[in-house]
Amino acid sequence: MVLWINLICFSLFFFSIQAQAALHSRSTSIVDLLSSSPNFFRLIRHLQQENFIPYLNRNKGLTLFAPVNEAFRRDTIDPVWPYHILNTTDLNRTVFATEFKAADGRPIALKVTHREESNNPYDLVNDVYIIKPNWRADSGVVQVVDQLLRLPPTSLEILSSESEYSIFYRLSSAWVSEYESTTLFVPTTDVFVNTFTSTQLSYFYSFYATEDVKTLFNQHSVIHERVYADDVVEPKNFTLRNGPIITLQYDKPKKILYFNDTPSYNFDIVTRNGAIHVLPALLNPEVITFTPAKYLIGLGATWFSEKISKEREYIAVDTSSHRGIFAPTNWAFRESSDIDYHIMENFYMPDVNKYYLSRTNAKSHDEHSALIRVATDTAGALYVNFDSHSIDKETIGNVSLFVLEKDIEPPRPLLSQLILLDEISMSIRYLASLGLGEDPNSTWFLVENDAWAELGLLRKALEHNLEMMQNVLLEYIFQGIHYFGSTEDSWTSGNYTTLSGRSIMVESTNENNDILKINGLSYNVKTRDMLVQEGVVHILDRLVVPFAIPQRDMIIAGGRKEFLSLLEKQGLLDMLEQGFSVVVPPLSDSDIKSKDFSFADRHIIDTGKQSFIIHDSLLSVDNGPWVHIEESGFSSCGNVFFVRSPIPTKRDASWRTFAISLLGFLTAAVFTNSGYKSYKIYQQKLWAAEREPLLVPARRSSSIHRSGSPAHSV
């Protein structure tokens, strides 16, 4: 509705101007035309105040964009009258130079969009309607517009206002406004995303990419010139800011602007300091050379990139070598890091859930190439030396880059390297207490905490006797450094010498590389090749004590010395270490005085004479009641079982059986009696329900009928 009202008003306005033009046929100047209509008295007043009347009268061949009176009521801006004037009357272009000049003397342009191009009912100049076109005078032409013309926004304002130009804006904002007149060839955001990887774009956003970003910007700008499509109907060369030549040509019939044969359909975006032409591709993106150091910046390892560029410049720029670079993130970076330990030549990615050892560029304490352990988990994530995993990765040429959440360093001494590993904390504690973690050129077979726990009373006995503990550990420490090497490698079978000087036989099975036989006993290697400064560590799933642990030591270590006192009182101490199983109940000092010979004797089990059954955590002697086992220890001297209560005698067992039977009988009787009472109550309820009609008073009986009988009163 509003549009139709505007159309009617504008139509009446046209007729008014035409009628007045007929009455003033002698008017030959632009000012005469404006003065002939009451719709321009505000404009004439402004032109007089700005002293533009003499200019319009003095010059011929001008075009004035003349705003009507209503335009001044709606707008509060100060009009720039030179921007409303063209030094031509031919509008057979799209972009026109106005009489308003920039600081460098070049005119600021406006853009005319014709009706046939925009499907609008009027022509447009910038974003203002031409409501009366081509009102001609002898000295020029008036184009009547409905609003004042505003100066176009700057290139920076246009770039910042559209998401389509967001990346170019972010990269070029420092240089866009550097010159008064600049023509920009702007690739869209999609062009950047499709041309560069996210790592490359992240590098561009960094402070370190200033020179590269400036080079990229220079590839897409012409300085000191305002180039529009109508200026290049014939091919024309332009020199970009950093020297290269670009050829522009405008196919006017098809409305396509070509940049080195690359077509653009979005061009001639007029700005206050020039023009913007939108590109569907980057111009010469190969001008930017990417290196491993630049990729590391894009991956968030800026400080490591600085260090490698300073200390190993050839590695920072080389992309041809098959190399792996492990870089910590900025928050994990340490200035003291050995840069060479983060670099591995001839790198290849392990398969899923596999690992291998490789030499780095660093030197170990013995001047050999320091090793690094590279592994992947079931999800394919990369781990380096167990405690640091990759949170991002990228490949440039033949170089593989990995960003680590934690910095890596050459292997440290065993105790400090492995002290935080919960799974072997008990082994580490025992080594530390015995001073066995500092032997150079050694191979340690350490066991998991679960393996120590399974020893039960044997472990407690070893903890009470450090000499025995040391003898056990020395059996699992070999002289020399012996690696598996990778997931696919097997242990080299042969005789090895322990730190105690004993020769033992180690064999690797063909079926499973993780199974080792040490002196004929099978062990599962849970974790291989944990690198430490003194050598290498492997983790086993079990521990076998290579000598007999006395039963006496297990009982004392378990804290039940009272049982030994009882055996001594009864003269049975010589029964220990004879190979008999000993069941140790909890006792007090008063128990020692009261317990007789038979009590002590029945806790020493001769399996040749007694039946001895163990099931889970229970044991039974001579088919007696089950007794709960709290802890145990197995030794060739004889096994020891700590139980929750003493083994009952046969009389105790008989009375217990009788008591249980009697209790069962009484319980059954109680349940039977309760069931019978419940049944009787139920029957009584049924009988009451059947008798209820017979007990109804006579005055209500007429409504009650019994089946098979005539109705009657009772």
Image: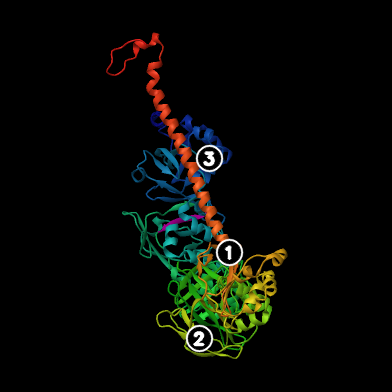
Q: CA distance from mark 2 to mark 1?
A: 44 Å
Which residue type carries mark 2? Asn
Q: Which mark is residue 53?
A: 3
| Residue 458 sits inside the magenta stretch | no
Q: CA distance from mark 3 to mark 1?
A: 132 Å
Residue, disc 2: 519
Dot 1: element: loop
Q: Is residue 16 visible?
A: no
Q: Mark 1 and mark 3 in contact (Cβ < 8 Å)?
A: no
Indicate the position of residue 436 as horizontal and vertical percent values.
65, 82
Q: Which mark is residue 522?
A: none
Q: Earlier in the sequence, mark 2 or mark 3?
A: 3
Indicate the position of residue 645 as horizontal and vertical percent values.
61, 62
Residue, disc 1: 649
Which residue type carries mark 1? Thr
Q: Mark 1 and mark 2 in contact (Cβ < 8 Å)?
A: no
Quadrant where the N terminus is found in the figure: top left
Which residue type carries mark 3? Ile
Q: CA distance from mark 2 to mark 3?
A: 114 Å
Residue under the point 53% across and 42% down: 54
